[in-house]
Amino acid sequence: AQTVTQSQPEMSVQEAETVTLSCTYDTSESDYYLFWYKQPPSRQMILVIRQEAYKQQNATENRFSVNFQKAAKSFSLKISDSQLGDAAMYFCAYRGAPTSGTYKYIFGTGTRLKVLA
Amino acid sequence: DAGVIQSPRHEVTEMGQEVTLRCKPISGHNSLFWYRQTMMRGLELLIYFNNNVPIDDSGMPEDRFSAKMPNASFSTLKIQPSEPRDSAVYFCASSLNSYNEQFFGPGTRLTVL
């Protein structure tokens, strides 16, 4: 069974600085998708970024980028130029590829990010 | 697009009462998911619908929980009778099909006294 591990329950970053959130996963599948979701105090789960395992290029979305290391089964999220609005709970999620017949997301336990002014 | 809509946003009820949570998925999305989020267990998938048909309800905790999707634009999650351990945030999410990314609603915070 697939698992997702976020080993940092909480992280802090100074405004305008860069922070990296860690995520590791375990799977025997070769094709899958990885996601980072943000959950601010409003509770809304917001998709931040996604990565297809077959793509070697790391996904980027403005200030958000990932470091995808397939062999190491690592999927970290880098937030550059941190802003106060980035303060939230961040969840890493795994989902198998359609060919696997898997539609379920496997979520990590989350990392709470605090942004210090 | 209005996104996934859930109601109510907050619900406080007493043990034994019936609770109904509502969800309107994004128009055109064929898949709908109900999740429960608690501190102890994180995010758990309760049930998944595809084209209004329940495909996987293995996450539904017990018979007190039931979910329906009478049409493509509406789903309900019902708890009868409710218990204090049902207190959680319940999310509805939809996706274009089973394998696209899921878009979440704002959640319903349920408190059972």
Image (spheres, rainbow, N blue to C red):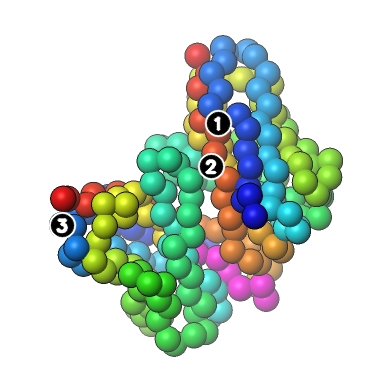
Residue A29 covered by magenta stretch: no
Near-viewer residue (B56 or A82): A82
Disc number placed over residue B9 in the picture, else none: 1
Which amino acid, mark 3?
Answer: Gln
State the image quarter where residue A4 is shown: bottom left
Q: Which mark is residue B106?
A: 2
Task: Report the Cα–Cα distance between label 3 and label 2.
Answer: 28 Å
Q: Label 2 sits on what residue type?
A: Pro
Instruction: Relative to A117, say whether A17 is above or below.
Output: below
**Gap in Å between the C-alphas at discs 3 and 1?**
33 Å
**Residue displayed at 37% across by 59% down:** A5
| Residue B4 visible | yes
Would residue A68 appear left or right of B100 to someone viewing this image? left
Q: Residue furthest bottom?
A: A56
Residue sitting nearer the eye, B94 or A14: A14
Residue drawn at x 55%, y 65% is A95
Do the CB atoms of the residues marked 3 and 1 lie less than 8 Å apart? no
| Residue name at image x 50 percent, y 22 percent | B111
SS at badge 2: loop
Please report, as a chain letter, where disc 2 is located. B
- State yes or no: discs 2 and 1 in contact (Cβ < 8 Å): yes
Quarter residue B23 falls in: top right
> For mark 3, what is the residue?
A14
Q: How crowded is the residue under tag 3: few (<14 C-alpha within 10 Å), some, or many (20+)?
A: some
In the rendered structure, which segment of residues is drawn in magenta? A94-99
Q: Amino acid at mark 1?
A: Arg
Residue B9 spot, x, y in % from top left = 55, 31
Task: Evaluate whether label 2 is on the same chain as label 1.
Answer: yes
Left-right relation of B2 to A22: right
